[in-house]
Image: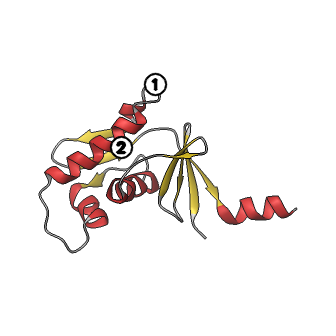
Amino acid sequence: MAATYILGPFRLDAETDTLFRGGEPVSLGHRAVALLRVLVEQRGIPVSKDALMEAAWAGLTVEESNLAVQIAAVRRVFGEESGGENWIETLPRRGYRFVGPATIRDQASVTAASQG
């Protein structure tokens, strides 16, 4: 089962690849969500630009600037939270790293708890 990531006031549902703020879905394209998911799954660990490009544009040849545009979109959303725009660090010429608050809520344990 897919996990749910709690990122401050945000929730990333890995099963549906949807980002929520509170109970409301955030308007964010699927490539930006794919990048966020990779970064959150590897939180605290540098993720190369190549790995991120492969996650969002698998098999496609695109300019690296597309990656920066999608990361900027995620930062804009996180910027609604104080300090949120700093949750994704840029590692010059290397990639990016998620350093924001993150906890994982396993869907299986949530389901088991609600049935108990």
Q: Distance between the residues labelled 1 and 2?
A: 14 Å
Q: Do the residues labelled 1 and 2 touch (CB within 8 Å)?
A: no
Residue 9 x/y as whole percent:
56, 37
Q: What element carries label 1?
A: loop
Residue closer to the observer: 80 or 112: 80
Q: Residue furthest bottom?
A: 59
Q: Is residue 72 left or right of residue 65?
A: right
Residue closer to the observer: 15 or 46: 15
Residue 61 x/y as whole percent:
13, 68
Number of marks in the image? 2
User: In the rendered image of this protein, does residue 61 appear above or below residue 8?
Assistant: below
Instruction: Point out the tag, 1 or 2, that comes first from the N-terminus.
Output: 2
Q: Is residue 25 left or right of residue 105?
A: left
Q: In this view, does 60 lie to the left or right of 24?
A: left
Q: Which amino acid does label 1 sit on?
A: Ser
Instruction: Give the residue at mark 1.
Output: 82
Quadrant placement of the N terminus? bottom right
Q: Is residue 78 left or right of residue 101?
A: left
Instruction: Name the residue: 58% across, 61% down.
Output: 3
Instruction: Give the residue at mark 2.
Output: 74
Q: Which colour scheme is used?
A: secondary structure
Residue 62 x/y as whole percent:
14, 62
Instruction: Name the residue: 28% across, 59% down.
Output: 52
**Figure quadrant of residue 116:** bottom right
Q: What element carries label 2?
A: helix
Q: Residues within 10 Å of mark 2 (few under 14, many from 20)?
A: many
**Figure quadrant of residue 107:** bottom right
Instruction: Name the residue: 26% across, 40% down.
Output: 90
Q: Which residue lies furthest to the top in this view?
A: 82
Q: Which amino acid does label 2 sit on?
A: Val
